[in-house]
Image: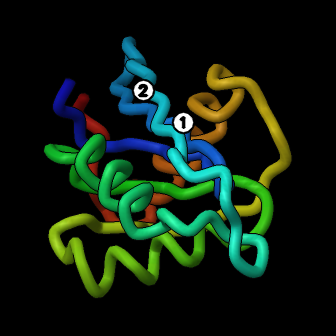
Amino acid sequence: MTTFHAVVWMDYQEAHVLMFDREHAEAQRVKSRSHHKHQGKPLDTPIFYAAIAKALVGTHEVLLTGPGLARNEFRDWCKQHHTGLHVVDSVASDHPTDSQVVAMARQYFKKFDGMAGNAVTQ
């Protein structure tokens, strides 16, 4: 599904990649393959981040959410390794359901698009 917006809830173990438009949402889960950790992070972090970025191909704007620092580290990784992906913000959240994440992202992008002067036309 190619959409204008996506939201990613993530921690170091998994990411819920949710692409959506006004009427539909499509979810994909990306899991870290490594159970071995170094200073709290899985050793396969670059592979994990690359898999998340691959799942977001075709999306123009991405909102990141989740507990901890993984979302901010992914944003920084994208700036270096996946410059075509536009991360608009990183928002802390606990462990909501996928439906709650999409609802929060729809509200966020409605405000974000309004501030940018863009009409939401999905």
Residue type at mark 2: give it: Gln
18 shown above or below 54? above
Q: Are marks 2 and 1 in contact (CB under 8 Å)?
A: yes
Point 77% across, 72% down: residue: 40
The residue sitting at the top extreme is: 23
48 shown above or below 107? below
Residue assigned mark 1: 16
Q: Which of 103 and 76 is in front in this view?
A: 76
Dot 1: element: strand
Around disc 2, counting alpha carbons within 10 Å, would you say few (fewer than 14), some (14 to 19), or many (20 or more)?
Answer: some
Q: Which mark is residue 36?
A: none
Q: In this view, does 117 lie to the left or right of 10?
A: left
Q: Nearer the viewer, residue 66 or 61?
A: 66
Q: Quadrant of the C terminus?
A: top left
Residue 47: x percent and y percent?
37, 60
Q: Residue 28 carries which label?
A: 2
Residue 50: x percent and y percent?
31, 59
Find the distance from the CA under tag 2 to the CA under tag 1.
6 Å
74 shown above or below 106? below
Around disc 1, counting alpha carbons within 10 Å, would you say few (fewer than 14), some (14 to 19), or many (20 or more)?
Answer: many
Residue type at mark 1: give it: His
